[in-house]
Amino acid sequence: MILTQTDRPDRQFALSLKRALRGSLAAFCLLIIYASSSSVFASSSVTPVRYPFCSKICPNCCLTPDRELQQQFRGNPPTGKSLNDRYLDNLWPLIESKIVAVTNEINKAVVRQTSSRGSFIDAQNNNKTASSLQSAGASTAGSYINSEALCRFATLSQGLASSEAKTDFIKFSAAKQSMDRQLLTSGMPSSANTAKSKDGKEGVSRGQSADKQARWEKYVTTFCDPDDYGQGSGSSGVCQTSSDIQYNKDINFADSFGDPLTLDIVSSGTTKDAESIEALSNNLYAHDLVNNLPQVTSGSETDGMSAEMRKYMLLRSVIAKRAIAENSFSSITALKAKGSPSSAKFTQNLMRELGISEDQAKRFVGDNPSYYAQMEALTRKLYETPVFYANLMDNPKNVLRQQNAMKSLELMQQRDMYKSIQRSEMLMATLLEIYLSRSQGGLDKQLVQSQ
């Protein structure tokens, strides 16, 4: 708003005052004279100049000027009404009307000035309000609008809890299968009476012979490599229908178990991964099963324990210790088993950002990424992409949110490490027990000999 010279508030006030005083100057002069006649000239501190004034009608009636002026305002004319009352009745209404006019002009000037100042104040408040709203909007946009980087953590972790829940079931299943194999449970290859004796008779042996015969048949049909031990010799004569995809997967830890992030061992039917893992486990743990145990009879010794009973209890002790060792293998197998398909697409896209082709990414991760594969993507692969570091050039709030997401993943990873340490602790405790058992056996012999 631009004010001209005549629109300025102080100029308007001056013009209004000038118009009011133009008609009331005389009234103010009379008012001053009236007040002076009763106060100034009556003051003892002021000595007026006394110039005698004599009336032409009455030469002896001489008054000083101050007395004359006082008589003009305070005298009593022949009519009987004092001049003071006449002035109040006749002169004061004129003065009062002019004072009212002056007051109205002053009010108008003040109101105009107040309106102008109010307009300036309103404009200033509007500017401050708009600035505050813009600042709040910018702060909100920076603090509460999540970046794409934070969404990557959420999408890659979809189905993570579901995949983890499957690991416990698969671990228990693998442990039970190994135990049934060692205990020659019905339905397992080790319990079949199909092993052949030297004279060609069938059904004469269970346990170790039946187990190894079943494993040999699986080897020649699935894992046998004709080039092993030299082409034209070794296993080339026994290999039957094995495929090069499965060559030596029953002994190749890296190819069968170490490198793949996802293993297809939960699908309906028997899969190649399930065959490889089972064969590898049989070669690593309990390679030699016990021979077929005879019928356990009641004890005939003093403690009520027969020799068969003692052997059977010793076998169970060995199986229990072996189960602890095999538990680590079963746990890692369960972590790599197929999980939830929720994050498959996003995990494969992440692999493609690393320069891996679509087919390779699909084979690397699988259609149903395992818990192990998802954690690999969230705790390692995600930070190998340039996009992650570009997203750090964001507002501090979003960077802090990413740090919190990484902290939560760190806690999950530490929990997995804690479980691994627990398994290692059990292995160390079992190993110590084995050494102590050997020492105890020697000590028992010494005690028996000393008696």
Image: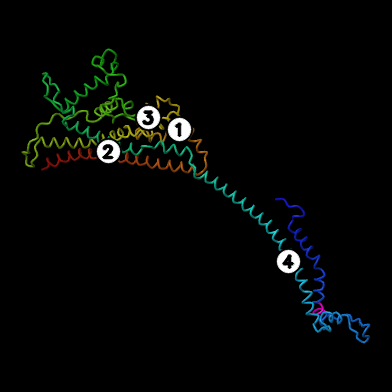
Residue stretch rendered in magenta on the structure: 36-40
Residue highlighted by disc 2: 427
Q: Position of residue 296 (x, y in %)?
A: 9, 35
C-alpha span from label 3 to label 2: 31 Å
Q: Judging from the image, what secondary structure is the residue with disc 3 in?
A: helix
Whether residue 344 sits left or right of residue 313 in the image: it is right
Residue drawn 33% across and 38% down? 162
Q: Judging from the image, what secondary structure is the residue with disc 2 in?
A: helix
C-alpha span from label 4 to label 1: 83 Å
Q: Position of residue 197 (x, y in %)?
A: 12, 21
Residue highlighted by disc 3: 365
Residue 354's place in the image compared with 303, above or below, is above
Which numbered disc, 2 or 1, marks the residue that appears first in the sequence?
1
Q: Nearer the viewer, mark 3 or mark 2?
A: 3
Task: Please identify the quarter of the rendering in which residue 240 is found.
Answer: top left
Which numbered disc, 3 or 4, marks the residue that appears first in the sequence?
4
Task: Please identify the quarter of the rendering in which residue 249 is found.
Answer: top left
Q: What amino acid type is highlighted by mark number 3?
A: Val
Which numbered disc, 1 or 3, marks the residue that appears first in the sequence?
3
Q: What amino acid type is highlighted by mark number 2?
A: Leu
Mark 2 Cα-neighbour bin, 10 Å: few <14, some 14–19, many ≥20: some
Q: Judging from the image, what secondary structure is the residue with disc 4 in?
A: helix
Residue highlighted by disc 1: 384
Q: Nearer the viewer, mark 3 or mark 4?
A: 4
Residue 338's place in the image compared with 137, above or below, is above
